[in-house]
Amino acid sequence: MKVLWHLLKEEYRFHVSFSSRFAFWTFPLFSMAGALLVVVSYFKITQSMEEERLRFMLDMLMFLYGLSVGGFAFMGREAITKRRGKYNFIVATPTFLPLRFNQTMLGLYLRDLTFYQVLIMLPLVIGGLVGLIFSPMTLVEAGMLFIPMVVSFILALSLSFLLSVVFVRSPLFFAAGGLLLVAWPVFVHVHFGDGALALPPYLITASAFAGDWAGAVFFLVVSLFTSLLMVLTAYMLVPRIWSDVTISKRNNIAGALNTFGNSVMGTLLSREYVELRRSWAALKMALSFTVPL
């Protein structure tokens, strides 16, 4: 718990370092205001949009957001192999302190789970509850709106954690997992006629609105159990001890200088070009866009 607390403080300080405390704390206020507006205007929105589509869009929005913040293995490895100026990260401490690397990586997952639940999801729920004062929506209906959103975020965060760990261990298995991830909604759409059914948190809402509360509880348990299973799998795949790997790279700076020139700007562009190629930045950016799609 002490390590988790320090990880949370580290995350807060890192966010504040490139924005400000004021900008940081206004974000939960915007989330709260957005949830309040959604609840207050919910029945007006559903007059022009199908209720099921609106709920699926909200669940999918939180699912994509969870995917975007869950690349812990990428960040963990780069935090160890590269120093960001004056910053050093707790996840890098197993290289020189008696801490196990898989424990610190699990700490990263718990850090982001706690951090973003408090920063985003809790204000959403509070804003929704305040909105009930000005809306005919019932507490049960609001719960069926926000509970699947929270579960969607947790599920996506766990999935992203697992995918990033698999990629660090074996890009081949990552590619296979990515294909399965894409094939799953296609399979569901072909056999059941609705690809939205591939998202378990959405089934919580669908079952509840159909009056099947047992089904809603079942899919809630399935979603949380799947998240836990993915986290435990990722935890077992992370090595207990980090060992630095020496990788040799060709000296491509001369070829880059021939392309960009020997001026000051050309030298800077050549250096950045070589660094981007060595860090596989293009592949990581492609994955960041293609996995959510």
Image: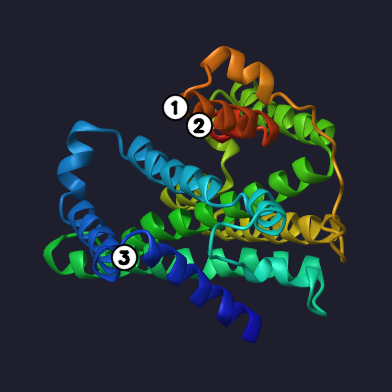
In the rendered image of this protein, does residue 248 appear above or below residue 4? above
Q: Is residue 257 left or right of residue 105?
A: left
Q: List the residue tagged with mark 2.
A: 268
Q: Earlier in the sequence, mark 3 or mark 2?
A: 3
Quadrant that contains the N terminus: bottom right
Q: From where the camera sits, is residue 1 visible?
A: no
Amino acid type at mark 2: Leu
Q: Secondary structure at mark 2?
A: helix
Amino acid type at mark 1: Met
Q: Is residue 196 left or right of residue 91?
A: left
> Can you give x and y, in whole percent of width and height, for residue 188 in the image?
63, 28
Residue located 86% across and 49% down the image:
245
> Can you give x and y, in whole percent of width and height, for residue 254 in the image?
68, 21
- Determine the residue located farthest toward the front in the rendered image: 263
Residue located 77% across and 55% down the image:
234
Q: List the residue tagged with mark 1.
A: 265
Q: List the residue tagged with mark 3.
A: 24
- Determine the residue located farthest toward the left in the rendered image: 134
Residue located 46% across and 63% down the image:
116
